[in-house]
Amino acid sequence: MTLKILKPGMLTTIQDLGRVGYQKYGVVAGGVMDSYAARIANLLVGNEEDAAVMEMSMIGPSIEFQEDSLISICGGDLSAIIDGERVPMWRPIIIKAGSCLQFSNVKSGCRAYLSAAGGISVPEVMGSSSTYLRAAIGGYEGRALKQGDLISVHQSDYIGNTKIQSFLQLYSTSLKSFIPLPWFVSEYSLPAYQSQVMIRVMKGREFELFQDESITSLLSETFTIHPQSDRMAYRLNGAQIQLKTNLNMISEAVTMGTIQVPPDGFPRILLADRQTTGGYPRIAQVASVDLPLIAQLKPGDSLMFQEVTLEEAEFLYLQQEKDIHILKLMISERWRRGD
């Protein structure tokens, strides 16, 4: 199956769950910004959770489907339509050959994920399909998608193969451009994407080296996302955070959600395309369970931080993974029953 890009949108790239195991060589992990939405998008169409998807930011693309296809769209709402009709999110959708899926302006969140049954097919680089734009590696020719690109999709060979093919045949005579399946992810399982969020954080390795007043400001004041933010890091506008004394650090390991404070005092949250090490003091670390909320913030949106313990963060993470596992079982059962 092939998808033709008619318009690329603001920033559309191919991503998976990241380039794991190469940070010791200085290779960034990369991958999707909102792993929760990408994983669910894959599960809905019978893919493995780490299959390659299309990540669309702010203003989405226009895509022509050259064969009947089963897809899902999860994450932020980028106003997806076909033939002028809104396309529902967080559920499997059959799209007829020749139909054009169009996205426009963002309604909520910042990024949406398009998964197709079988998974998007691009050459893997160091075991990953993720696009790392700064190094021009991975994904589709190491770059963002542009007009005229033809994106291949693997033949689906997971649970969905028989059922998906039967659904495609069943609906092949329909006159509609797309048909949503009658089941979907409950609203109770959806992240609360908002333009103002509370983000839970743990103390960073250098937390105690900051002035008491600065720590109070970090945990009580509102910060906004600076326009000069990207997949590497969000720069924050707000209170300036100060160290107690000057500090010369050797670069140390960082990860997604690490909050560094550079000399200008304005915190930065490291994201998917972060560097592997950093030399700025780490005042806090975002709890993994809240990374999807961070990923869906856009310039001008605001956030506050709430301190939690490592044990609380671990509990929240395990609870989220348990919920995803239950959702995976329920989706598998839906496909097995074929309803």
Image (spheres, rainbow, N blue to C red):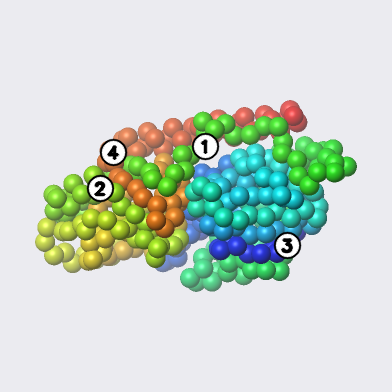
User: Is mark 1 in CB contact (under 8 Å) with mark 3?
Assistant: no
Please give left or right for residue 104 compared with residue 220 in the image.
right
Q: Amino acid at mark 2?
A: Glu
Q: CA distance from mark 1 to mark 3?
A: 29 Å
Q: Secondary structure at mark 1?
A: loop
Residue 203 in percent (x, y) is at 25, 46
In the displayed structure, would residue 92 be above or below residue 127? above
Q: Quadrant of the N terminus?
A: bottom right
Q: Amino acid at mark 1?
A: Leu
Task: Find disc 2 in the rendering and name its residue.
Answer: 221
Name which residue lies at 70% across and 58% down: 63
Q: Quadrant of the C terminus?
A: top right
Task: Find disc 4 in the rendering and name its residue.
Answer: 308
Q: Amino acid at mark 3?
A: Lys
Q: Would you call the spot at circle 2 few (<14 residues within 10 Å), some (14-19), or many (20 or more)? A: few
Residue 70 in percent (x, y) is at 73, 45
Q: Which of the two residues, 254 or 1, is positioned nearer the viewer here?
A: 1
Q: CA distance from mark 3 to mark 2?
A: 46 Å
Name which residue lies at 70% across and 53% down: 101
Q: Which of the two residues, 318 or 63, is positioned nearer the viewer here?
A: 63
Task: Identify the mark at residue 190; answer none if there is no mark.
Answer: 1
